[in-house]
Amino acid sequence: ETVMTQSPATLSASPGQRATLSCRASQSVNTNLAWYQQKPGQAPRLLIYGASTRATGIPVRFTGSGSGTAFTLTISGLQSEDFAVYYCQQYNDWPPWTFGQGTKVEIK
Amino acid sequence: QVKLVESGGGVVQPGRSLRLSCTASGFTFSNYGIHWVRQAPGKGLEWVALIWYDGTNEHYADSAKGRFTVSRDNSKNTVYLQLSSLRAEDTAIYYCARWGITSGGLYYALDAWGQGTTVAVSS
């Protein structure tokens, strides 16, 4: 099973700042990596797949990068609606499909 | 538009059973695999099960093997998750999600999610 580890657990930032979230896989997942955003009381929403491809309707301020075992989600110019929990998930080695434990982006 | 709606959640005693449903609209349901993912209160996302587009194959998390069964009825655009021998640790919001397919026919991420249905296991 591929274990996904996200850091930091919580990131405090101000609107307009850049946020950088990390995700590491216990073994290579190539670029079979997705990022999801979840706001309180809502279902997760796909942001990025293929490590760097934005899903339909996702703003360009969300950028995914990385391959193999190290991945980054960058949010350039945080907006109020971006404060949420972000999860990475690998779909290279399945079953199971595995998620990271999440990074909460909160307002500083 | 793509829509997934879960139902069937509720409060159930330990050891009892419950059947969840996930009804889809807005896309050709029989072309897509459907995942179940759960989220315990205040916790992260845990993958539970997948059923292939035609129902010929299923996969389960270790926590679900032998207790949960996923099935589908493509004539009703619905996937079911039968939960049996429920435990307190099964308490969670259960989401169904579509297994996305690229234009080249490659499976990728979970590209559409329902709003979830809540299961609470308590005596």
Image (spheres, rainbow, N blue to C red):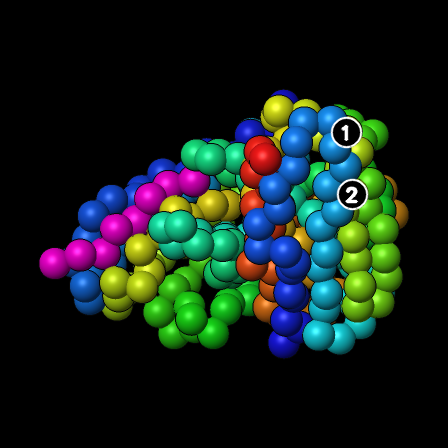
Residue under circle 1?
A77
Query: Residue sitting at 63 percent across and 56 percent down?
Result: A8
Residue under circle 2?
A74
x, y percentage for residue A43? 51, 38
Under circle 1, the secondary element is: loop
Where's the N terminus of chain A, which quadrant?
bottom right
- Name the subunit of mark 1: A
Q: Quadrant of residue B58?
A: bottom right
Q: Compared with residue A8, is residue A107 higher up or lower down, i.e. above or below? A: above
Q: Amino acid at mark 1?
A: Gly
Where's the C terminus of chain A, which quadrant?
top right
Q: Which residues are magenta?
A: B112-123
Q: Is residue B70 visible?
A: yes
Q: Quadrant of residue A96?
A: bottom right
Q: Amino acid at mark 2?
A: Thr
Query: Residue sitting at 40 percent across and 50 percent down?
Result: B42
x, y percentage for residue B45? 51, 54
Of residues B43 and A53, the one drawn nearer to the viewer in this rendering: B43
Mark 2 nearby-residue class (10 Å; few <14, some 14–19, many ≥20): some
